[in-house]
Image: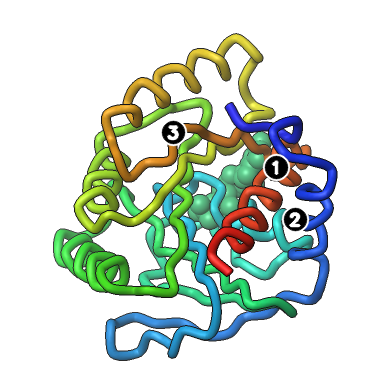
Amino acid sequence: MSSESDFSKAEIGNGHRLFAGEWSFLSAAGSLESLPRPKGLEVAFAGRSNVGKSSLINALTGRRSLARTSNTPGRTQELIFFGGSSQLVLVDLPGYGYAAAAKSKVTAWTRLIHDYLHGRAALGRVYVLIDARHGLKTVDEAILDTLGKAAVSHEIVLTKCDQVSEAELAKCSDSVMRAIRKRPAAFPDLIATSARTGAGIPALRAAIARLMHERS
Ligand code: GDP
């Protein structure tokens, strides 16, 4: 499991600086045609509805309500782009796996994500969020399959780690690691976070800063 100790002090500082400035909404896209022209390195966040994706984006950017936390899972069927003072663009992918979503919505979601993931040169990595209480579900395996087929670099981020004991966290982490070892495009590590306590947020920022450094 990646933690702050896997990054040098300088990298933690780089991560901090990368996210320190003002972040704001850039645009939303509900179709391939409405995707914005790439303007830097994109890092996207995917996860089941209610996994804590909005909360994580808000924690990363230090904003209380940049990404909308919602009580109506499955509502937003758009990709949302956020920008700050650097060349980094955060992309909030629509939540998936909402049980009550109509089949047509699922198809539209799949097509939009598929279109975005294929051939988006600016996309550096997708973080796939997994609730530490629940572990990998079938719908998560489906997005991992899609990412693998598109050969998009991706890494698992566990969310809501404040809700599980250390033993449960270790168990969840082990089973996720076992599952992703079989996937060549998956980053062979994961980051455990809590938007509530801030645990893992400096490590995730540092990982993104490292990615930017590698890609520049
Ligand atoms: P999204 O649908 O994936 O964007 O999820 P949200 O960010 O809206 O979060 C869904 C619910 O989980 C909300 O009630 C949040 O308050 C809660 N939540 C999100 N992150 C955390 C966390 O790190 N710890 C705890 N305990 N709850 C969280």
**Relative to 174, residue 85 above or below:** below
Q: Where is residue 24 in the image (x, y as percent from the top left)?
A: 68, 79
Q: Name the residue under label 1.
A: 203
Q: Mark 2 points at which residue?
A: 15
Q: Where is residue 189 in the image (x, y as percent from the top left)?
A: 50, 32
Image quarter of residue 83:
bottom right
Q: Where the C terminus falls, by quadrant?
A: bottom right
**Relative to 153, residue 104 above or below:** below
Q: Position of residue 65 (x, y in %)?
A: 70, 67
Observer-nearest residue: 68 or 57? Answer: 57
Q: Is residue 211 left or right of residue 7?
A: left
At label 2, counting other C-alpha atoms closer than 10 Å, the crowd grade (few under 14, some 14-19, many 20 or more) is many
At label 3, counting other C-alpha atoms closer than 10 Å, the crowd grade (few under 14, some 14-19, many 20 or more) is some
Observer-nearest residue: 199 or 190? Answer: 190
- The answer for how far apart the CA atoms under marks 2 and 3 are is 21 Å
Q: Where the N terminus falls, by quadrant?
A: top right
